[in-house]
Image: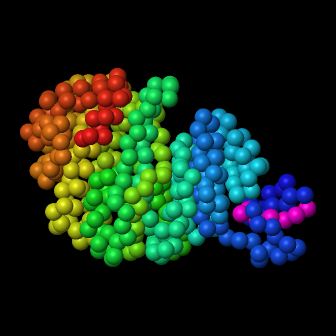
Amino acid sequence: MVRVCDGCVMVVCGARFSCTGRRVDGEGLAAVKTPTVSVIMPVYNVDRFVARAVESIQNQTFDDFELICVDDGSTDRSGAILDSMAERDIRIEVVHTPNGGAPAARNLALDRARGTYVYFMDADDWCDPYMLEDMVGVMRAHDLELLVCGFFIDTYFGEGDERSTEVKSYPSQVFGSQQEFRLAAYELFDRNLLYTPWNKLFLRSRIERLGIRFRDTFMDDFPFVLDYIRDVERVGVMSEAYYHFTRARADSETQRWRPDLYEKREEEHGWMLDLYSHWQLDGDPASVEMVQRRYIERLVGCIENVCNPECDLSKDEKVSAIADMIGSERAQVAVAAARPRTQMMRLMLAPIRQRNAGLAYSEGCFISFVRRHNGRIFSTLKARR
């Protein structure tokens, strides 16, 4: 079996096949069929999970897809696992490249993609078998540019199979206009449905027409989605959840101190302010409240980050840094506009409202302790904030 050039044609025992599995007769290369969906998967050092991710795509009831896996310089067995699976399934293309990060890997796959639609998937997650069939059906039925679905957050604790599952979803709806989508977007943001690319089906021609690619920045997938939805017109939502976002609590919730987290959150908030200004909804009460509450909740995370034992600042320096954060005009505007949904969150925002850096420091130390020592409690509180 030989893979030729860009993976579009393969030779098996003298017969020629397209990468969708359709035979190409004689010299009839024009008969090669373009896949309906291009599934894009960046892969880096996830040999424990990547086979499960690929198999969940192989097992889809909708089989007219190409799966482009970019092995981003993995140093474990991820690349070898992908090569082995590609040898047995001609719908899979594996590209090996030096490590350049997930944005570069996704962009490389986008440059090679041929499908009508694009679906992004992470290599340590998995999806239910009816996902592509259901999503393509709705996209086609309503001629959509974007389809958003629900998803599961599967949080694992320790080394065993003990986990909790949280569902993120929104009632099924096809928005009647661009403005209708924009007015409802604050609810989709509130339910965490508009941040990531992997619970969405995108129209590839629109990605290419706008020249959208993933940026080499913090939360690279979020600005990609923001670029896509900025002027999108035809949007639908499916309440069904198919995608399983896997969170290994031991890895994700005891992450090291990030010295640049506050600056990155400030940048991210700027993206949101710019989007809602562009949408001319920076005077819409519901939208403004969501944007400001979102910012102030993430500011609590920045305070906890400073209080992480990994942070090499002294206590006085930590308190001073927190004072600068909570005393800024942006923070005070946000805390005045935010309407926390739980009593717990109202209590957590009190030190910010009072500009009490010492109390905020104590609160941050407590959150950091819980986060490092009891992932289950931290996960539950975070989900119910």
The answer to whether residue 352 is visible is: no
Residue 46: in magenta span? no
Image side of residue 385 versus residue 74, left or right:
left
Which of 219/174 is in front? 174
Q: Residue furthest right?
A: 14
Q: Residue at x 70, y 57 (%)?
A: 91
Give the percent coordinates (x, y) of residue 57: 61, 52
Image side of residue 53 versus residue 96, left or right:
left
Which of 53/301 is in front? 53
Q: Which residues are magenta?
A: 14-20
Q: Residue at x 53, y 50 (%)?
A: 128
Say if 332 sits above or below 90 in the image. Answer: above
Q: Residue at x 38, y 46 (%)?
A: 167
Image side of residue 28 versus residue 334, left or right:
right
Which of 167/276 is in front? 167
* Image quarter in which the C terminus is found: top left
Image side of residue 314 versus residue 200, left or right:
left
Say if 18 sits above or below 262 in the image. Answer: below
What is the tally of numbered marks visible in this picture?
A: 0
